Amino acid sequence: MSDKNTPYALVVDDDGLIRMDAVDILEEAGFRVLEAANAGEALLVLQKHGEDIQLLFTDVQMPPGELNGFHLARQCYASWPHIGIIVASGMIEPSEGEMPQEARFVKKPFSADVVYDHLQELLPDGKKPQPLKQRATSTW
């Protein structure tokens, strides 16, 4: 059960199944998750909720005519620098300068453990949801 102190994450992927997987992983980590199917939708969500969002998790490839995930990541960082960014792709790897310096890249298919590891590195303790904090201190 989430409360008003539970941070938000935004997941952007045009593939509904992959988006659902990412949503499940982030909910398990303790985020309240907002979703978008493309960069245009994501920008609308960011404009409305950007101050409350702590994480952007985006795919690189978007439908034709849309900004790709690298562009979305750069635009997000320029307008909402407090948001941590993870960019994922199974086909395209970022080249130098394509992502904000603080952003993380995840190769698809990704596992929950890989995503959690990036979240631990990316988010300061004050921005981590409680389940993610507990995971970091538990022994597996």
Image (cartoon, rainbow, N blue to C red):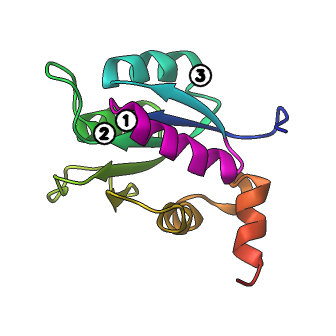
Identify residue for label 3: 49
Image coordinates for residue 118, horizontal then vertical, percent: 49, 64
Q: Is residue 54 above or below residue 67?
A: below
Residue count near mark 3 (Cα–Cα under 10 Å), binned few <14, some 14–19, many ≥20: few
Q: Amino acid at mark 3?
A: His
Q: Are marks 2 and 1 in contact (CB under 8 Å)?
A: yes
**Tag 3, which secondary structure?**
helix
**Quadrant placement of the C terminus:** bottom right
**Tag 2, which secondary structure?**
helix
Query: Viewer-nearest of labels 2 and 1?
Result: 2
Q: Is 134 within the magenta? A: no
Q: Amino acid at mark 1?
A: Ala
Query: Viewer-nearest of labels 3 and 1?
Result: 3
| Residue under the image location 58 percent in, 51 percent down | 25
Can you see residue 83? no
Q: Quadrant of residue 123?
A: bottom right
Identify residue for label 2: 74
| Residue under the image location 32 percent in, 41 percent down | 59
| Residue under the image location 63 percent in, 60 percent down | 124
Can you see residue 64? yes
Q: Are marks 3 and 1 in contact (CB under 8 Å)?
A: no
Q: Amino acid at mark 2?
A: Arg
Identify residue for label 1: 78
Image coordinates for residue 137, horizontal then vertical, percent: 76, 77
The range drawn in magenta is 13-31
